[in-house]
Amino acid sequence: MDHTLRFAVLQGDGIGPEVVPVAVDAAVAVLAEHGVRAQPEVLPFGSSAIDSDGAPLPERTLSALDTHDLWVVGPHDSASYPAELRYPPPGAVLRSRGGLYANLRPARADVNIPALAPDIDVLIVRENSEGLYADRNMAVGSGEFMPTPDVAMAVGVITRAATERIAVRAFDAAEQRRRHVTIVHKANVLRLTTGLFRDVCLEVAQRYPDVTVDQQHVDAMAALLVRRPADFDVIVTENLFGDVLSDLAAELSGSLGLAASINCSDDTVMAQAVHGAAPDIAGRGVADPIAMVGSVALALDWYGRRYGDDRVRAAACELDAAVAATVAAGIATPDLGGTATTAEFAERLRQH
Ligand code: ATP
């Protein structure tokens, strides 16, 4: 294929400009080794875009996204923006622009990184477009209401269509893994909403007779992930539950600084690490780039599978292997107890 892989690079705030370039440079290098040309283009995003364009996610960035194959997006720190620019959150705009209904968050321990759960290896498949996060459910407004200063309400939405498509994602992923899906809900209390989520997932399960399926209430799931993490493979759940469980799984596997993630539709993928802008360490050159590199590797794997390019999938594998080899060589940033800077980690990554 002569196609040049075009990356839209949105570095974002805080540690974004420190970790995103590490991931992009590493990806471009491994793709080149596999005969794939890649061309990153940095687009304005975050507080620097407020300075240059007057908005954290300018229209010129949004329209440029359509011409790129992969989106690589750093964290945004909306809380630091002027009040009138905090809404809508840039993440929400990006998700709806790409129709990115699935958020895939793997958590797997690495033998060379101390982990609370050394045997954890799960993939959390989080519905990303509705659920109990009220802001996703509205064409206009935030989905939260305050009828009086002392009463606040939020809208939760579960639909058959959105649940079915995320369930298909989860079961398809399970077929590539250990063929086990756990449906997570709270149908004993949120009977209609998360009950519908559970029921539709169980219907989809009928199409995958070779995949074992079980279900847990979200509170029990949190306890079981700590008690016996090795018993779980793919976890499919609604938006809010998935967000909480994926931070838990990330910490069990080592650190939030390791947690990779992609947001995707059927055609578009966005690499974005689970962590935020980490303003407490931003600018000190010590941010851990592993989560961002891992996110780009996930996006390449997704792209290679979706568009049938084995070279891109091989590059994704190699990127993961390079991170593992760098860590195995004892190179670690302070969040993992090491002394390496982001630049030193990046340099060693290049050598693997
Ligand atoms: P958000 O709400 O935007 O997701 P947050 O408030 O949950 O952000 P983070 O910005 O993710 O928080 O930071 C949480 C803690 O984890 C901070 O102490 C931060 O320094 C640390 N942290 C996050 N990402 C990294 C990283 N890549 N490397 C090292 N430490 C990190």
Image (tube, rainbow, N blue to C red):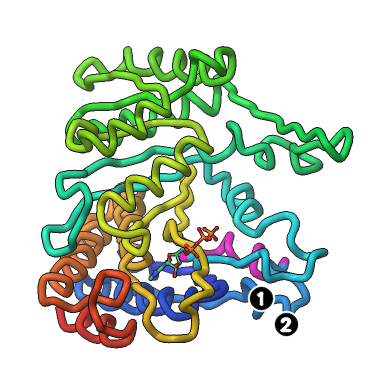
**Which three-letter amino acid code belongs to the residue tagged 2?**
Asp
Q: Is residue 134 visible?
A: yes
Q: Which residues are magenta?
A: 59-72
Q: Quadrant of the C terminus?
A: bottom left
Q: Could you tell me how far apart the alpha carbons at marks 1 and 2 are, in whole angstroms?
A: 7 Å
Residue at point 47% right, 43% down? 243
Instruction: Return the residue at label 2.
Output: 51
Position in image of residue 266 (x %, y %)? 46, 41
Residue at point 32% right, 75% down? 28
Q: Is residue 167 left or right of residue 312?
A: right
**Which three-letter amino acid code belongs to the residue tagged 1?**
Ser
Asked whether disc 1 touches disc 2, contact meaning CB atoms under 8 Å apart, the reply is yes
Q: Which mark is residue 47?
A: 1
Residue at point 48% right, 21% down? 186
SS class of the residue under badge 1? helix
Vertical relation: 219 (above or below) 24 = above
Residue at point 83% right, 36% down? 150
What is the crowding at mark 2: few (fewer than 14 residues within 10 Å), some, or many (at least 20)?
A: few
